Image (spheres, helix red, strand yellow):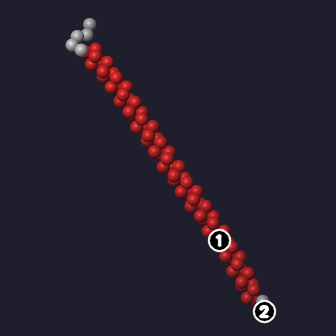
Amino acid sequence: IELGGKRAARVSEASRGRELNAWDYEQLRLDVVTATTRAFISVLGAQERVALADQTVQLAEQMVTSVGRLVNAGREP
């Protein structure tokens, strides 16, 4: 037989323990979401840098071709 509200205190403590566990879970879930979002944004940035590098290479190749034509045209009288 529990006296002096000990049962109520024990039930209240258990309830708070569950609530604390729920908050801990939510914090971990948000940490995972944050890390995933940061990784996704990082990948998007890397993809954009690769696309810009590809465009730069294409422009350089076109310039080499154009300059080669001008050089060949200058050689001929």
Q: Residue 77: which disc?
A: 2
Residue topped by disc 1: 59
Question: Looking at this view, is 76 or 7 the one in front?
Answer: 7
Q: Secondary structure at mark 2?
A: loop
Q: CA distance from mark 2 to mark 1?
A: 29 Å
In the picture, residue 50 is in which quadrant?
bottom right
* Quadrant of the drawing holding the N terminus: top left
Q: Position of residue 23 (x, y in %)?
A: 38, 33
Question: Looking at this view, is 57 or 22 the one in front?
Answer: 22
Is residue 15 found left or right of 44 in the rendered image? Answer: left
Question: Looking at the image, is 72 positioned above or below residue 22?
Answer: below
Q: Residue furthest right?
A: 77
Kindly identify the amino acid type of the residue bearing the numbered disc 1: Leu
Q: Secondary structure at mark 1?
A: helix
- Mark 1: few, some, or many residues within 10 Å (few <14, many ≥20)? few
* Quadrant of the drawing holding the C terminus: bottom right
Is residue 61 found left or right of 7 in the rendered image? Answer: right
In the picture, residue 31 is in which quadrant?
top left
Give whichever of discs 2 and 1 has the lower sequence position: 1
Residue at the (42%, 35%) spot, across then down: 26
Residue at the (51%, 49%) spot, across then down: 39
